[in-house]
Image (cartoon, helix red, strand yellow):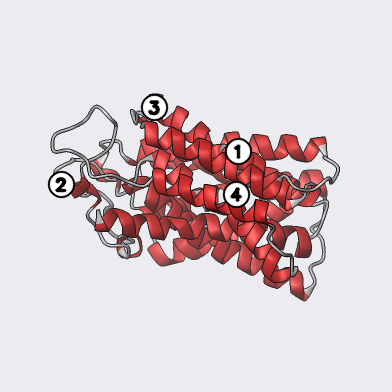
Amino acid sequence: MEANIRWTALTALAPVAWGTNYFVTHEFLPTGHPLYGAAWRALPAGLVLMALCRRLPRGAWWWRSAVLGLLNVSVFFVLVYVASQTLPTSLASTVMAVSPLVMMLLAWPLVSERPRAAHLAGAGIGLAGVCLMLLTGTEGVNVRGVLASAAAMLVSAFGHVLTKRWSTDADVGTGTDVVASTAWQLTAGGLLLLPAAAVVEGPPPALSPPALLAFAYVSLVATALAFTVWFAGLRHLPAGTVGLIGLLNPVTGVLLGTVVAAEVLTAQQLGGLALVLTGVVLGRPVRAKRGSSGSGQEPAAAAAVTAAEPVRACGRTGVRRGSAGRTR
């Protein structure tokens, strides 16, 4: 359980970083260039991780990296960029908060993780809390932005569960440690975006110093670091739990607004924050019974790894031979 708690805390870094991405994109990054914006977010992050690992995909991971890069990076980053530029942070975050429910439903057929009642209850309570926190304004709704945010939620939920499934396949010889596979996805997604950006958007826009700093933050922190710890969490925790941790994304957006914009949290928003945290607690990992497999949860021994392992795993195989016989 202590190892699961450490993995939960480590995974939580990702949605917190992503919660800041909406604000940074809206305030500092150039408008009208979602393809270039997504490419400049993905490619530097992928190249940094590739330089750390110094490894190329092998076998099936060549085409897997391309598929996951298209879903988790190319399409997702473009949709998030459009949503961030055209919607209030509250509305975009609220739509993305449905992701835990979608991840749970997709994880059942794809990775045989049957959602627990506590997961479903936590998702429902957390979503209610997000709505209570964020649906307080009367700003106009941009239909294009809502559709982009909803599509981003669906694409990311499917791509993340597919990442979990492929990373647990019995392909011991591929050495699919989390840092390397994240690097491959980000690099592939960035390379797919560059020619599309050149054709659709023409020459790249000029960037001011604040925009360059913003891209550095978005690429290195909200992408390279965040995706590494997120996929590490998917390897060691049930998809339902990871999805619930993702509810910290909109919570971060609200808290950032209070700090940066000097906004005051109302009683309604504080109540919503309490509901979201309750939902995350309900979806926390539980100790699996020895030999139990009906729930889709993995034995606790399979998750008994240190929080620093994703980085140490770089340069060696990510397969752990243990009681579960899987890589999570």
Q: Nearer the viewer, mark 2 or mark 3?
A: 3
Q: Residues within 10 Å of mark 2 (few under 14, many from 20)?
A: few
Q: Nearer the viewer, mark 1 or mark 4?
A: 4
Label 1 element class? helix
Determine contact: label 2, label 3, CB under 8 Å.
no
Asked whether, in this view, residue 33 is left or right of residue 285, the answer is: right
Q: Which mark is residue 272?
A: 4
* Residue at the disc numbered 2: 322
Residue farthest along the top direction in this orientation: 109
Q: Earlier in the sequence, mark 2 or mark 1?
A: 1
Asked whether, in this view, residue 70 is left or right of residue 233, the answer is: right
Which residue is pictured at 46% across the width and 57% down the height?
A: 12
Q: Nearer the viewer, mark 2 or mark 1?
A: 1
Three-letter residue code for mark 1: Met
Three-letter residue code for mark 4: Gly
Q: Nearer the viewer, mark 3 or mark 4?
A: 4
Work out whether 257 lies above or below 164. below
Residue 41 visible here: no
Label 4 element class? helix
Q: Earlier in the sequence, mark 3 or mark 1?
A: 3
Q: Which mark is residue 153?
A: 1
